[in-house]
Amino acid sequence: MTAVGATVLSETWFPPSQRATATVIYIISAAAGGALVFIVGPAVVPEPIVLCDNITWSMNSNCSEQNKRYINSYEVHEGLKVLNVTECSISVLLFISVILHFPNKPPQPPSVTANTQRLGLVEGFKTALRQWRFWHLALCCAIPASVFSAWITTTEVVLHPFGISQKEAGWMSFSGAIGGTLFGMVLSRLSDVFYRKMKIIMMVMFSIATVSFLLFILILIKVLSNEHWSFYFTYIAACVVTLGTQPLYYEIACENLFPVSEAVISGLLGFLNIVSNTLFLLVTIIPNIGTMWLNWAVFVTSLLSVVVLYLFKEEYRRMDIDLPVSQSEDSKL
């Protein structure tokens, strides 16, 4: 839900030539913080040590749940407690500081639409939900984004059957998240510089991500040779491109659904993201379903995103008011 305030903040405080950049930086800053979890988590919480018939269990060997015995459960529990309390304390302190210090808006609006009245909360919800454009964007935004976020947070489980340790999986996800943060800043500037090209940029990036996911899966199932560098490269490339591009969905949704409030649009997309994420994770508790389907799911939804986005006819309603076509064309010369 951290993305809900991104489009509101960028619209309120930044001119059209900086809006996409502000939105992406807001969202990927949360991803950068989340990336630290992949490193801090394994450092604070020890990896469970399992005995199988009084012998240390290897992830490559078979052992029934009845014969498994965890010998460091207390240390794992205490580590989780320290990690959760620390994260909660930092969040509370930041929340209080924003309430006490951050102003609601700048002295002068940065654009025409920043000072334009939006639809009310109830009317905005009704207007958005009645438009096919919203559901079109939700289909290529909420579902792929939620599946990817669930997939990357369960990396240890997904890669465990292939001999990847918790620490190694954490470093892989950390690298992908940090790379996505930096890459997102580059894409956001491209979106601001090349007006009305956001859809093309997103399609190209998600096509690259889809190919990377496919290559990663083919390496896992040994269709392609399991070179160490290719295994890491395809995983990290898919994470970098996906994380760097996803925030632009919120920006293009706000452009196409104006004058519905940015808070309403982002809130609805965030809610659908959470619902899809929950449903996706619920599937994982089905007995004997395995983990390989998680990799295929993230590939299929990424491909779905490209196809649905291709069929979407975008509009730039805010940009048309703030920067008419003739003006935006002149600004590039």
Image (tube, rainbow, N blue to C red):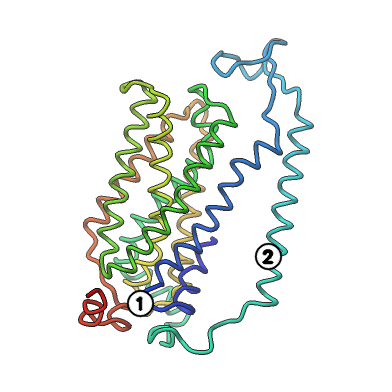
Q: Are marks 2 and 1 in contact (CB under 8 Å)?
A: no
Q: Quadrant of the C terminus?
A: bottom left
Q: Quadrant of the N terminus?
A: bottom right
Considering only vertical position in the picture, is 24 above or below 86? below
Q: Position of residue 313 (x, y in %)?
A: 22, 65
Residue under label 2, please give it: 94
Q: Position of residue 172 (x, y in %)?
A: 50, 36
Q: Residue furthest front?
A: 333
Residue under label 1, please give it: 258
Task: Pick whichever of labels 2 and 1 is earlier in the sequence.
Answer: 2
- Quarter-wise, where is residue 137 in the image? bottom left
Closest to the camera, between mark 2 and mark 1, is: 2
**Residue shown at 79% from the left, 31% from the top:** 74
At label 1, counting other C-alpha atoms closer than 10 Å, the crowd grade (few under 14, some 14-19, many 20 or more) is some
User: What is the count of numbered marks?
Assistant: 2
> Element type at marker 2?
helix
Locate residue 199 relative to residue 80 in the image: left or right. Answer: left
Q: Position of residue 88 (x, y in %)?
A: 71, 55
Q: Position of residue 276 (x, y in %)?
A: 46, 50
**Residue shown at 27% from the left, 61% from the top:** 199
Identify which residue, 232 or 84, lies in the foreground. Answer: 232
**Of the residues shown, which amino acid type is indicated by label 1?**
Phe
Considering only vertical position in the picture, is 32 above or below 126? above
> Element type at marker 1?
loop
Identify which residue, 211 or 289, lies in the foreground. Answer: 211
At label 2, counting other C-alpha atoms closer than 10 Å, the crowd grade (few under 14, some 14-19, many 20 or more) is few
**Residue shown at 72% from the left, 45% from the top:** 83
**Residue shown at 31% from the left, 22% from the top:** 223
Real-space CA distance between mark 2 and mark 1, rounded to the nearest whole angstrom: 31 Å
**Of the residues shown, which amino acid type is indicated by label 2?**
Leu
Locate residue 102 relative to residue 77 in the image: left or right. Answer: left
